Image (cartoon, rainbow, N blue to C red):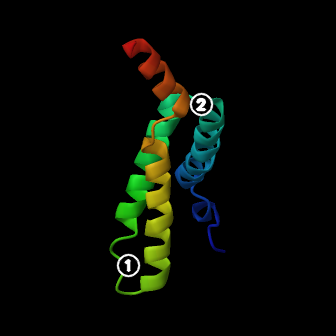
Amino acid sequence: MADTSARYRYPEAGRVAVVGVTPVVVGAGLFAGVTWARIAGVLVAALAITVNLPPIPYSLLWSMTLIALYGLVVRGGCGVRRESLYQWLRGLS
């Protein structure tokens, strides 16, 4: 009889939970407008761009599409919010 206890690996289940919970927490932080969520979103998108570079020769269209979408996420996360720009301009006068 085969041992089936090795079939389930609990550390992998923990990693899956972290990977599943992290975007939810970062997304909630983005909706709340906190800075740490913008930084985390940009870092995750930059990591995803890096991960999608090696498979370009094998699936060009898919990799380039994901890189472009993640680039938009980075651009959006690094953009200046209007409220903070207006507050900065008021401080100059």
The residue singled out by tag 2 in the image is: 33
The quarter of the picture where residue 53 lies is: bottom left
Residue closer to the observer: 4 or 10: 10
Q: Position of residue 21 (x, y in %)?
A: 62, 44
Q: Position of residue 74 (x, y in %)?
A: 44, 51
Classify residue 55 as left or right of residue 10.
left
Q: Distance between the Cα atoms at labels 2 and 1? A: 34 Å
What amino acid is at disc 1? Pro
Residue occupying the point 55% across, 27% down? 83
The residue singled out by tag 1 in the image is: 55
Q: Identify whether 45 is placed above or below 3.
A: above
Residue closer to the observer: 2 or 31: 31
User: Dividing the image into 4 quarters, which one contains the C terminus?
Assistant: top left
What amino acid is at disc 2? Gly
Q: Secondary structure at mark 2?
A: loop
Residue occupying the point 38% across, 78% down? 55
Residue occupying the point 50% across, 53% down? 73
The quarter of the picture where residue 49 lies is: bottom left
Q: Secondary structure at mark 1?
A: loop
User: Dividing the image into 4 quarters, which one contains the N terminus?
Assistant: bottom right
Q: Position of residue 45 (x, y in %)?
A: 45, 54
